[in-house]
Structures are given as structure tokens and as C-alpha cells.
Amino acid sequence: MPLRNKPLHGVRVLDLTRLLPGPVATLHLADLGADVIKIEDTGAGDYAREMLAGSGREEGGMSDIFRMINRNKRGLRLDLKQVRGRDIFLELCRDADAVVEGFRPGVVNRLGIGYAAVSAINPRIVYCSISGYGQTGPYRERSGHDVNYIGYAGVGDQIGAADGPPALGNFQIADLLGGSLTPVMGILAALIDARQSGRGRYVDVAMTDAVLSHAVVALSGVTAKGTASARGSDRLSGGLPCYNVYRTADNRYLAVGALEKKFWETLCDTLGRPELKTSHIVYGADAAPVKSLLADIFRGKTQSEWAAIFAQVDCCVSPILPMHEAIDDAQLRARGMVIDPSPASGPVTQFAPPLKLSEFEFTVERQAPERGEHSEEILREAGYSDEQIKAFREAHII
């Protein structure tokens, strides 16, 4: 059977985003076959090239995280503050299917490249704006980051141990759920509609909205009793003995997720404590002695010893792995989720796309682009001559 084109083959996306949320959104589109053109200004460009280095390692003007989230894209440098730079962008929009931007509300309109200007040239284009608070509302022009968005959405208050302060996990919920996956959902829905109707849509994504709309467990508490459960005390946040985290003898941890009765009973039998079977779904004072007993039991063996035991029974108990061990885990390796450094993929370990499709084999076709690496190529495709491109470069438009 001949290999099919990738699902988004033929879709062209103009990507004006920077840092983490937008670039991860367009990464997903690029991995699925879209021609993503990463457009950076002629100055610093995407700040993630340097400021998100994490470990401090930054080689050749490109941080590790920039390499991870900008693979499979082409790069164009363009000064949108110059009239000719704006005109080039609008010309590129004629043959584009989508534009993704992450500036503060109003910026693209002031530059003359907002949805109204672009859709006048290309009525079928999908135009997605990603922001912290959305294009409307009293907070629309406020600055913010992940910690601010989850704070406003009520989720920041839910994360952490009981009787402790709110905790910051090293996973950016608003940025990645709200600023990456939600835009992809909106863009794909609008692209399908545009193919059918010939008319694009404006997609307004607020990261705060996305977090709130997925906080279903906390919201259920509000609807039931007027307030969410206290931090660390709800069904899935530490209130139950059967769904919790326990320390092992070597100061590592186990994740216990025996929510269903059959799993809890299997867990009790495995631990040799059948008397605990009646303490499955218990909270507060009733839960405290059960948690304490389980904590004492789990402290009796190392994490690897417990992992070997629970690998033989089916009751939702597993080790909590540090990232350097997770990327070597047999299941994740079997699923092809880890891309080791290679000449094709680049010098850093990366993650594969989070889905599998029939007749689709994921590949890293190009590493993250250098600043403006494909500028001339892209402009030639748009019909500009070598003389025009040379003039653009001399005028610092590209």
C-alpha cells in the first residue's frame, strides 16, 4: 500500500507566536504535516531561542527547548513594523490556510495584519489569537503567565498538599492545555468548516478560559455545596487513601490509583490487609488512620521492590518516576514517544506527538530553523524575484 500524505499535508500556517504556548500549538500542526512558517522579527526574534534554556545550555543561538518545540517548521525573518514587511505578510496570507498569533490584544490590528485585514485578502483563512485573558473583558490587556492564569481560573488554589500553600508543578497547565491544545482544536475545527463553506473564522483563545472549562472536578464541588473542596482533600487531590501518593523506603514515591472497588480490594489483598476493604471511599477523620497505615506499609520496601510486586497484580499502583527515568521507561519507548538525539532530529532528546494515526509515520523532517533560515525560499515561492529579495534584505525588512 503506498504511503499516504500526512493528515495536514497541503495546509500552510503562518506562525507569529513566541515562547511556549503558540509554538507548541504549531508544533502539533507541523508534526501532522502542515507547512508551518515561523515568522520572527529582524531583532531578537522568538525569546525562547535563549531565555528558556532551562539548564542554561544554549548552543548556536538556540536553546534546547526552542529546538524541541520548533522542529518541522520553516523560518522567515520579517519586520512587520515596516510597510513593506506588512505587505509581504499580507501577500503570504493569500495562499495560507491559517495564521496563529500570540501578541497582546490589539497589536496585530495596529500593525495592519489583524483578522479584518487578512480575511479581506483571503476570506477562507483561519485566524487564531492566543492570549492570557482573551480579546474581550476587563483583563484583556493585562500581562500574565501560567501561574496567573491558573490562579484566576481557581485551579491554582486546588494544587498542593492539605494545609499547605498552593504549589507550582513543573507542568504549565494554562500554557499547554490552554495555549497549545485548545488553539489546535479551534484551528482544526475552523479549517474543516472553511473547506466546506469557503469562509474562515476568527478563533479567540484565552488560556484562563481553557483552564476554567476543564476544571470539572473542582466545579462539581461548587455546584454541589457552593465551594470547591479544600486543597489536598478532594477525591482526586489527596482526600482518599485509595487515590494518593506514598513514600517508599528509599525516599521515592508510589502512585496509588485504586479508585474502583475491585482495584482497592486487590490492593488490600496484595498488602495482606483485607480488613481495609471496608475503608475504600473515606474522607477526613475516617481516612486519616487508613492513610497512616498505608504510609507505614509502603515505607517498608523500596520503590523498585514495590514496582516488582505490583507489576504482577492489576490494581493501579505504579512508581512515580523522575523525568530522566520516564524517558527510558519500557512502555514509553515501545510507543516511540522518545526521540533520541540524531543527525536527523538534532542534538537534544525530544518527545514524539501524543497520538498515533493509521498509515502515518511520524518523522522529524527538519530541525528547528535558524533565524530566517528559509526566508529566501519562502519569498521565492510567493513570487518575489531575487532582486526584490535582495532589496528587502538591504532594507532590513527580512
Image (cartoon, rainbow, N blue to C red):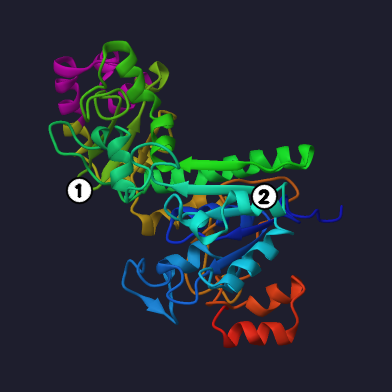
- The residue that appears at 56% across and 52% down in the rendered structure is 334
Q: Residue 148's quadrant in the figure? A: top left
Asked if marks 1 and 2 touch (Cβ < 8 Å), the reply is no
- The residue that appears at 17% across and 18% down in the rendered structure is 284
| For marks 1 and 2 on the same chain, the one whose residue lies earlier in the sequence | 2
**Above/below status of 94 relative to 39:** above
**Magenta span has 286?**
yes
Spot occupied by residue 274 in the image (x, y as percentages of width and height): 28, 17
- The residue that appears at 73% across and 41% down in the rendered structure is 199
Dominant secondary structure of the residues highlighted in magenta in the image: helix
**Above/below status of 371 relative to 286:** below
Q: Is residue 104 left or right of residue 100?
A: left
Please name the residue that numbered disc 2 is placed on: 119
Q: CA distance from mark 1 to mark 2?
A: 58 Å
Spot occupied by residue 158 in the image (x, y as percentages of width and height): 26, 32
Spot occupied by residue 151 in the image (x, y as percentages of width and height): 27, 39
Any mark on residue 251, and which? 1
**Magenta span has 123?**
no
Q: Is residue 98 left or right of residue 112?
A: right
> What stretch of residues is rendered in magenta?
265-294
Q: Residues within 10 Å of mark 1 (few under 14, many from 20)?
A: few
**Above/below status of 206 relative to 58:** above
Residue situated in front as seen by the camera: 277 or 45: 45
Residue situated in front as seen by the camera: 151 or 398: 398
Residue type at mark 2?
Ser
Residue situated in front as seen by the camera: 142 or 282: 142
Residue situated in front as seen by the camera: 158 or 240: 158
Tell which tag, 1 or 2, sits nearer the viewer: 2
Mark 1 secondary-structure assignment: loop
